[in-house]
Image (cartoon, helix red, strand yellow):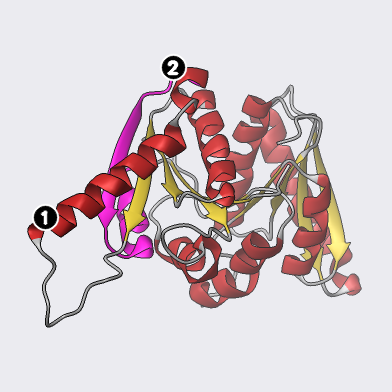
Amino acid sequence: MAADLPVFVGVDGSAHSVGAAMWAAREADLLRAPELRLVMASSDPLRDDEVWETVSAVVDRLVSSHPRLEISPEVVHGYPADVLVRRSNEAQLLVVGARGHSSLSAILIGSVSTKVAMHAHCPVVVRDHRDSGPVAVGLDNSRHSRAALAFAFDAAARHAAGLVAVHVWRDVGYVPSVPALSLEMTEVREEAQRVLVRQLAGWTEQYPEVPVREVVQCGHPVAELAAASVDARLLVVGHRGRGEFPGLLGSVAAGVIQHASCPVAVVRGECR
């Protein structure tokens, strides 16, 4: 991430977006970001005064608890997802809440948060904040998951937290009528473990203060990563992985955003 760029957070006045803004302010402090920008999208220019009051109230709330952080409001006309994707070009990190004013939270997640996570030009953190537990990261031996690993180690170091590295493998040769031999399963698992060790090579030396726990699991990536999120403060996944299982940000990362129990950071391989 480019340290000279601001942190952005999308707000809409809901309790979830206020929580996202509070989390973003703490991250901006830890990242020593030059600025935190609260962005609120409005599709009705006649409501601009009301919208400015809403976003300014959140700014006032954050200023009192983060006096050294420059915090500014921004109102932009347009659809929230489109506005935030455009603003991501100028950010080192973009934070969005998982739910807004809509009672149909799954629709909001699908139409705003997931779209932002899929198309943003910087790392995106989605969902309510959490202040305890390790940082978990899903790895699939692709360049995109290497970018996720870099983000995850940096986050763990910032928060003085441990890191859980999760490599999920599938028994691609499984045929229901022909159970896999125990020896075959052992060999596949051992190879998956070697793949994970290779992915972590060098990182533990670069971050000696971060304790690492390795998890190699056979199963579906969404289910296993969601399970890893239960005790985590943050779950990190890469964008468009191409390793041992299909891309993390296709059905997998979208599913993780829906089902994780903690905030999810989606990191594209070409992110700053």
Can I make out residue 183 in this image? yes
**Which quadrant, please, contains the C terminus?**
top right
Residue toward you, 35 or 53:
35
How many residues crowd mark 2 within 10 Å: few (<14), some (14–19), many (20+)? few
Labels 2 & 1 near each other (Cβ < 8 A): no
User: Percent x, y for residue 17?
Assistant: 61, 55
Which amino acid is tagged 1?
A: Leu
Tell me the quarter of the picture where residue 35 sits.
top right
Identify the residue at image location x=45%, y=22%: 160
Which amino acid is tagged 2?
A: Glu
Tell me the quarter of the picture where residue 176 sits.
bottom left
| Range shown magenta | 207-231
Identify the residue at image location x=81%, y=30%: 4
Tell me the element at label 2.
Answer: loop
User: Percent x, y for residue 214?
Assistant: 31, 37
Disc sitting over residue 225 in the figure:
none
Tell me the quarter of the picture where residue 223 sits.
bottom left
How many residues crowd mark 1 within 10 Å: few (<14), some (14–19), many (20+)? few
Tell me the element at label 1.
Answer: helix
**Which quadrant, please, contains the N terminus?**
top right
Closest to the camera, between mark 2 and mark 1, is 1
Residue matched to label 2? 209
Sequence-first tag of 2 and 1: 1
User: Percent x, y for residue 133?
Assistant: 36, 35
Left-right relation of 190 to 13: left
Q: Is residue 82 magenta?
A: no
Give the alpha-carbon distance from disc 2 to disc 1, as whole Å: 37 Å
Residue matched to label 1? 183
